[in-house]
Image (cartoon, grey):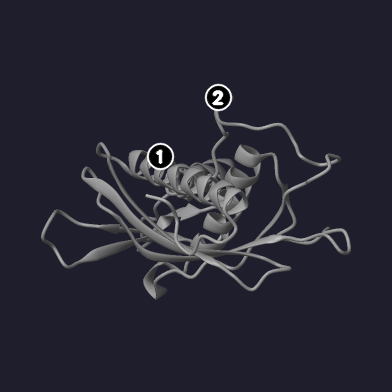
Amino acid sequence: MMKNRQPRQPFAARAALAAAAALLALAGCASKSDSYYTLASPVPATEAAASTLGTAAPIYLELAPVAVPERLARPQMVVGRSAGSVQVDVLEQHRWASSFENELRDALASGIADRLGAVDVTKGGRPNAQPVWRIAVQVRRFDAVDGGRVDAGFSWTLRRSDETRSMSCQFELGEAVAGGIDAVAQGAQRVTAAAAAAMARSLSAARANPTAAVCPT
């Protein structure tokens, strides 16, 4: 007795099904793509200064690598949970454009330079025999909570390359943020801009009073 056989699908039908499955897989991957954020932001026109390059007293600045808590030294965003929780989430699909400490260094250096009309020689390009203002920044905290706040604390020292004296400064700021990782990133960007403005003010104060040891209150 002959057995009944199921009819085989035509090759074209099998190919169409395979293509549809591949498209569905690609759509699933696309929905899970990484998001990248920057801490840099344009300096408002009211805060920007004309370049001092070519003037009698150009300002050159150099920002040392920024020291950050070890948990933040990564490109992934680190976000705390609700207030009182000791847990944090390392967000694999929400990342800074570079490692956090490098992103912070670039944002601070450009923010300070634009506010003072200074020449940023952090990555090279300083003319010989020109004094440079060297800034060493330590991030004491940079805590973000989705739907809560971004709270940060910075300390830094300022020293001109041809002098031994230095100025020590501190700055703390908190920003309320709405829900969503985009809002957290924007809050972190605002905090970084405020820190750059504070560092620019401290450099101006150090130029005006070279004997000062601490930032004016």
How many dots with numbers?
2
Say left or right for 165 vs 86: right
Q: Which residue is mark 1?
A: 186
- Under mark 1, the amino acid is Gln
Residue at figure coordinates x 42%, y 54% from the top left: 93
Residue at figure coordinates x 68%, y 69% from the top left: 163
Residues under numbered marks 1 and 2 in contact, where contact means CB atoms less than 8 Å apart: no
Element type at marker 2? Answer: loop
In the orientation shown, which residue stands out farthest toward the right?
128
Bin the neighbour count of mark 2 within 10 Å (Cα to Cα): few under 14, some 14-19, many 20 and up: few
- Residue 1, position in %: x, y? 35, 63
Disc 1 or disc 2, which is closer to the eye? Answer: 2
Say left or right for 184 vs 122: left
Q: In the depicted view, which residue is nearer to us: 122 or 26?
A: 122
Q: In the depicted view, which residue is nearer to us: 76 or 142?
A: 142
Which disc is residue 99 wearing?
A: none
Residue at figure coordinates x 25%, y 36% from the top left: 178
- Under mark 2, the amino acid is Thr
- Residue 22, position in %: x, y? 52, 48
Say whether residue 165 is visible: yes
In the orientation shown, which residue stands out farthest toward the left?
84
Q: In the depicted view, which residue is nearer to us: 157 or 66?
A: 157
The residues bearing labels 1 and 2 have C-alpha atoms spaced at a distance of: 20 Å
Q: Residue 72: which quarter of the image?
A: bottom left
- Residue 155, position in %: x, y? 42, 63
Element type at marker 1? Answer: helix
Say whether residue 11 is visible: no
Q: Earlier in the sequence, mark 1 or mark 2?
A: 2
- Residue 150, position in %: x, y? 30, 49
Which disc is residue 46 wearing?
A: 2
